Amino acid sequence: MSKHEKTYVTKADFMLHGGDYNPDQWLDRPDILEDDIKLMQKSHTNTFSVGIFAWAALEPEEGVYNFEWLDKVIDDIYSINGRVILATPSGARPAWMSQKYPEILRVNGSRVKMLHGGRHNHCFTSPVYREKTQKINRLLAERYGNHPALLMWHISNEYGGECHCDLCQDAFRGWLKKKYNNDLKSLNDAWWGPFWSHTFTDWSQIESPSSIGESMVHGLNLDWRRFVTDQTIDFYENEIVPIRELTPEVPITTNFMADTHELIPFQALDYSKFAKHLDVISWDAYPAWHNDWESTADLAMRVGFIDDLYRSLKQQPFLLMESTPSMVNWHPVNKAKRPGMHMLASMQMVAHGSDSVLYFQWRKSRGSSEKFHGAVVDHDNSSENRVFQEVAEVGKTLEKLSDIVGTNRPAEVAIFYDWESNWALNDAQGYGLETKRYPQTLVQHYRAFWEKDIPVDVITKEQDFSNYKLLIIPMLYLVSEETIARLKAFVAGGGTLVTTYISGIVNEHDLTYTGGWHKELQDIFGINPVETDTYYSSDRNAVTYRNQSYELKDYATIIKVGKVTVEATYEDDFYAGTPAVTSNKYQGGKAYYIGGRLEDQFQRDFYQELINDLSLEPAFKINHGLGVSVQVRQSVESDYVFVMNFTEEKQPITIETPVTDHLTGEELSGEITLEKYEVRILEKKK
């Protein structure tokens, strides 16, 4: 298939607009449910996720079902030409189930059984809970599988957390037996068992990590995190058995997340593994717009990084499953979106590959913890307030973007993101405990391309990277010999590879490589990193690169070099004048090593040279200043160019090639001005 051919992730050939709808909270208010249908039309929304936390309404008593209210809701949505993303309700089970079957309640790391409440407070190993979820899901699939409104299945909600009960301990031991071929010696070798006399002589002695037990065996910790991911996926696979059986043509998703504040990928589960089990990637995005610790453009860049990661997991469009049209209720400060920001933030998602703008939530709850979380419909039940009107404007815009649905964003640059390496690095009792910042470091390197409008795939180590011109793997602390061999082949075949300090330190068992840096890495890069100096927050050094000085902080690697090109040297300390950045020609390609954590301007200047050397170009060239982002989605017929002003000031841009404003039909070229938070969507016919 051509890289410009469309991939429709659902049967819809239009942009999805709507979001989480909880009519089960309003069953005693039919007038409210009637208003919802009218307001959906006024807001230009067309798709609604229903049933996400509705188990108590669907099965108020064991074996007693009430689907009639859901029948009417789905029929009413379809009557206005709307579509439904139907959720399975396993994210929050009813109280009667916890009371009758206490085994389904989780046990925490301190081995304390949790009480009923919250969300995802269930054991993912419990046979009872697996049976119950499969039963309710079968009933949903039988009843609604052929309904014309059904667009997609939304499995559970924001999977996460872990359970340490006896069932999970047994499952963990079984997982380990399979991984280590039922050989305890292999496990002890991988976990470095003699340390602190932690050699196991029977499988029954192994427990999951705990603050009241073992937490310092890093191989154990790493395998537990892998198990939690695998067991969560196994629970999900159990959930979807009847859905796959009865509705094989209906795509399936579950909503991924991002950790908040600095907006980094969700850490608790390895989404690179989970993605293989989904038809469509979707995620819940809640950036803290207008915060007081970074610029709007910096935050937009972080959003773009996660968008590109989740899009790249399946190399197809993704869905924005949840966002807020106004504010959330769980940030430390819950600030309202300023006028224009909702349109800009929504279009950024589309620009990076989303075929939807969906919200949590459609209507605000009256009570409990989410009653002040932003929604399309506020407590005033009005279509006249600012937020509702801005949602309607987004809806009108999305209605004009149907041609963009299914288009992708081909890239020649890739950055590795690796969940397992981050787990292992965070576990390491070394370096700077507060300055490792692996995801944030990747974003530093991503910045140089985002600011130049050069598309980037954020990929995982399992994916094929052979066809990229440039592969960047900062701080890849954990790297297996298999991955090293693939990296070597990439460079030998003509690729350009960039790595940094604290890379290639441990293998897949979190055991250090002995005898210095791995021999194959020394071959690729032509160096041996012999020592890593870790700085206090007040420490500073600098490197000289191309006769210019750049600030260095946090980390500096002392490098033993072979026949390589020294690109930059340290200015201070006992390694002053020694190599800080090197390059090495290896067969058909080239490998760069950056020994220290350097300021953003170094990344800009360093990667600009590679951009020039490798003839990397934006998909569409527009001249602009910092804070403006240009992202392009491409089809066989057209390039769709999103020009976005992520600053609080007017910004001039220059369009060198004539284009058409996709929304207005206006022909544009030369210099134009973007207003604060303005976005223009342009089309260039091929």
Image (cartoon, rainbow, N blue to C red):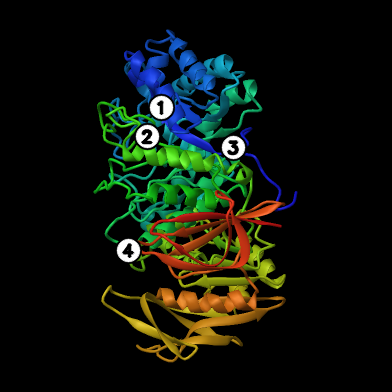
How far across and how far down the image is residue 187, in percent? 51, 49
Would you name the residue on which mark 4 appears? 433
**Which disc number belongs to residue 39?**
1
- Image point 36% across, 89% down: which residue? 572
In the picture as drawn, the residue positioned furthest to the right comes out as 1
Secondary structure, mark 3, is loop
Residue 238 vs 186, above or below: the answer is above
Dot in front, 1 or 4? 1
Secondary structure, mark 2, is loop
- Image point 34% across, 48% down: which residue? 214
Q: CA distance from mark 3 to mark 1?
A: 20 Å
Is residue 160 something one can see in this rendering? no
**Contact? badges 2 and 1 (CB < 8 Å):** yes
- Give the mark nearer the N terminus: 2 vs 4: 2
Q: CA distance from mark 3 to mark 2?
A: 20 Å
**Contact? badges 2 and 4 (CB < 8 Å):** no
**Contact? badges 3 and 2 (CB < 8 Å):** no
Residue 542 vs 45, above or below: the answer is below
Would you name the residue on which mark 3 appears? 14
Would you name the residue on which mark 2 appears? 376
Q: CA distance from mark 2 to mark 4?
A: 42 Å
> Is 246 on the left-hand or right-hand side of 545?
right
**What amino acid type is highlighted by mark number 2?**
Val
- Give the mark nearer the N terminus: 3 vs 1: 3
- Image point 47% across, 33% down: which residue? 44
Q: CA distance from mark 1 to mark 4?
A: 51 Å
Secondary structure, mark 1, is helix
- Image point 52% across, 32% down: which residue? 236
**What amino acid type is highlighted by mark number 1?**
Leu
**Contact? badges 1 and 4 (CB < 8 Å):** no
- Give the mark nearer the N terminus: 4 vs 3: 3
Dot in front, 4 or 3? 3
